[in-house]
Image (tube, rainbow, N blue to C red):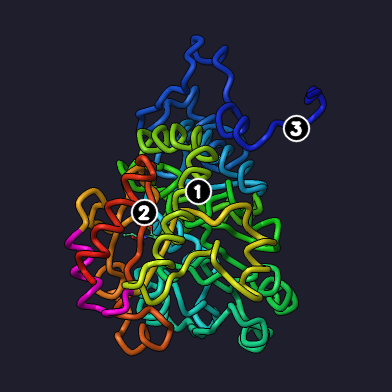
Amino acid sequence: MDRSNAPPGFATRAIHLGYDPAGAEGALTPPIYMTSTYAFESAEAGGEMVAGTRAGYVYGRTRNPTQTLLEQRMASLEGTEAALALASGMGAITATAWSLVEAGDRIVIDHTLYGSTYAFFTRGLARFGVEIAVADLADPAAAASAIRPGTRMVYLETPANPNLRVIDIAAVAAPARAAGATVVVDNTFATPALQRPAEHGADLVVHSATKYLGGHGDLLGGIVAGRAETIARIRGSGLRWMTGATLSPLNAFLILRGLKTLELRMERHSATAARLAALLAGHGAVARVAFPGLASGAAADVVARQMSAPGGLVACELAGGLAAGLRFMNALRLVTRAVSLGDAETLVQHPASMTHASYPPEERARHGITDGLVRFSVGLETPEDILADVARALDAAA
Ligand code: 4LM
């Protein structure tokens, strides 16, 4: 195969983009710049760098060379002009909103979001004179009527946490563009290896890098990617003087290490998750399974258009409801009871009492985040061992 004129592929960019060992004593892996500040070659040069008329690093809260490499790679993988690395997913989401929204603005959010994100919009930003409209953005008609002229921002996750609803990004982006609203898509569950929201009309893509991007359950981090001018604004205000949510250089290095295997890991997570979803769907103790790979009707068309594989999250509800779900979780031996996702270890958690406990119970019920729902993050262990543990625990809980 002659690829001499082809642009480098996803995995090649995830491993090589932006780094030449020749510039770092031949070191194969990029150095970690553990520094809080930078020496100015002269007083005048320092003043010019602070003023932005001369390129260079000034202070570690807003820029660091290890972060810069991570930001370049994430921008390339998401297909955006620029990206910004932050201390956590919540750091990325809050720095973005604080930078782009002001009192009097209207934000439309999807009704199914990670619990702390939902709390930030409905109980945090709402205290500062921002109108928060909660809508079902999976329904294009509901999206079009909620996103009216004057809407500043539209915020969604797809697949959504925890019940894996999928949202047609292009169907939301069309009315948002007409209204002049910025579309922000949380791509944590799919990652750019499986879905690139900017290709479907999203203006900004946010991530909890704590999850699949890092991939090993050993750090917290966040990313926001989009147009260079918008990212510069979020760096210059949301990160610099509104949150100070700076990613440490060590964590930037660890996320760069995680990115090298992202495509490979997402293939394995997706393949094992598909096998787990099939096992659950065929088991008498299970009432309902949510998994993008099992979507039907219009949702299946959205998955086919937007995602190259279904991802590693699976949710289910046991026929015996909440009590059976808790019995099932306690009967697991290999699968670990823990919140978070995207790690090598298979994790299981109970959204109503854990990741989505910050939703008022009646809103959880209205939005289909049921008390009996159990969420798996399927890991990288030998697939047969994961399936055997789940099958045995289902039999024990039935
Ligand atoms: C969890 N999630 O679900 P930091 N966006 C999405 C998320 O799932 C999360 C965040 C942002 C879980 C954490 C306990 C779609 C987090 C927030 O945790 O701030 O990096 O990301 O289990």
Question: Which of marks 2 and 1 precedes in the sequence?
Answer: 1
**Residue pointed to by mark 1:** 271
* Residue 132 against residue 80 in the figure, above or below: below
The answer to whether mark 1 and mark 2 are in CB contact below 8 A is no
Check disc 1 and give the amino acid type.
Ala
Q: How crowded is mark 1: few (under 14 residues within 10 Å), some or many (20 or more)?
A: some
Mark 2 secondary-structure assignment: loop
Question: Which of marks 2 and 3 precedes in the sequence?
Answer: 3
Report, in whole angstroms, how far the alpha carbon at label 3 lies from the one at label 2. 32 Å
Name the residue nearer the viewer: 74 or 271: 271
Q: Give the range drawn in magenta.
A: 318-331
**Quarter location, residue 175:** bottom right
Mark 1 secondary-structure assignment: helix
Quadrant where the C terminus sits is bottom left
Numbered label attached to residue 341: 2
Check disc 2 and give the amino acid type.
Leu
State the residue at coordinates (23%, 57%). Answer: 337
